[in-house]
Amino acid sequence: MSPDDQSLRAQVWDWAKTIGTAFLAYTAFTTVAFANYRIPSESMVPHIEVGDRVAVSKYAYGYSRYSLPFNAAALLPKSTQRLFGHLPRRGDVVVFIHPMTGETMIKRAIGLPGDVIQVRDGDLIINGVAVETSPRELVTRTAFERGAETAQRYDEQLPDGVRHATHNLSNHAPLDNFGPYTVPEGYLFFMGDNRDNSLDSRWDGMGAVPVENLIGRAEIVYATHMGDDPSAIPRWMRPLHH
């Protein structure tokens, strides 16, 4: 073998090692640590907008077949077990797999196993106690593909102490009255912060979500879609939990 051939082989081998190392590092990172998710809907307004990208910590609730990259979950049998698994707390913003459609979703954890969830005229009730709310104020925002939109904005104080802003578009929306519903063991109850624009666990088309379907906790908005709204506020590196 000529010196030129040996040099070429060495270069190819170096490139192969570099690519292989990068691939293994990416696989380990996306399997063990973080993933990212692009927001497709307005269900989590006012905290997250369409087009925003969030970083998701997979280790927050342990690992399951849904934590694997490259759709490797399709190769594994279904399981009710999670490695190092534990439940979210009420108020966590969670990325999970829709139990009926298989889509990736993002909502706020509202009910834990055994909780009794009710909604009456848009007011959230957990275990028979109405969730504390701040006074409502009217706000105007630019809705995705719909232009100006007026909503009632108020804060909810969940039983675990998490406080978050909520939008209400109507006092007579289809999901403004729900329950009482007891969250089954091994399941979680999710709701969107944009209450009248969220198909969540109140809806028969989704219902409660098995713990097995959790991907992780959404930690930060690391990139934001500004759209055409000149008044939009950038949300780069904005934490979703305090």
Image (spheres, grey):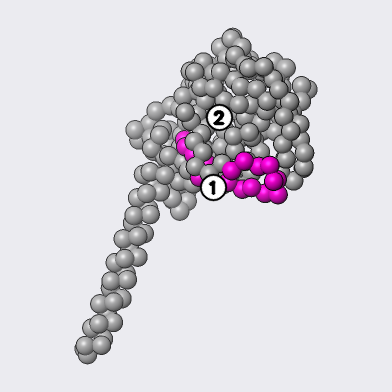
Read off the residue under disc 2.
Answer: 108
Q: CA distance from mark 2 to mark 1?
A: 20 Å
Residue range corresponding to the magenta coloring: 217-234
Q: Secondary structure at mark 2?
A: strand
Vertical comparison of 114 with 2: above or below: above
Identify residue type, mark 1.
Answer: Ala
Discs 2/1, front: 1
| Identity of the residue drawn at 61% across and 22% down | 155
Location of residue 42 (image quadrant): top right
- Tell me if residue 204 can be seen: no
Q: Are marks 2 and 1 in contact (CB under 8 Å)?
A: no
Q: Is residue 188 left or right of residue 5?
A: right
Q: Give neighbour class at mark 2: few <14, some 14-19, many 20+ (Cα, 10 Å).
A: many
Q: Which quarter of the rendered picture does the N terminus lie within?
A: bottom left
Secondary element at tag 1: strand
Q: Is residue 81 above or below residue 24?
A: above
- Which residue is most to the front? 231
Compared with 91, 25 (above or below) is below
Residue at the extreme bottom of the image, as rendered: 2
Q: Is residue 46 visible?
A: yes
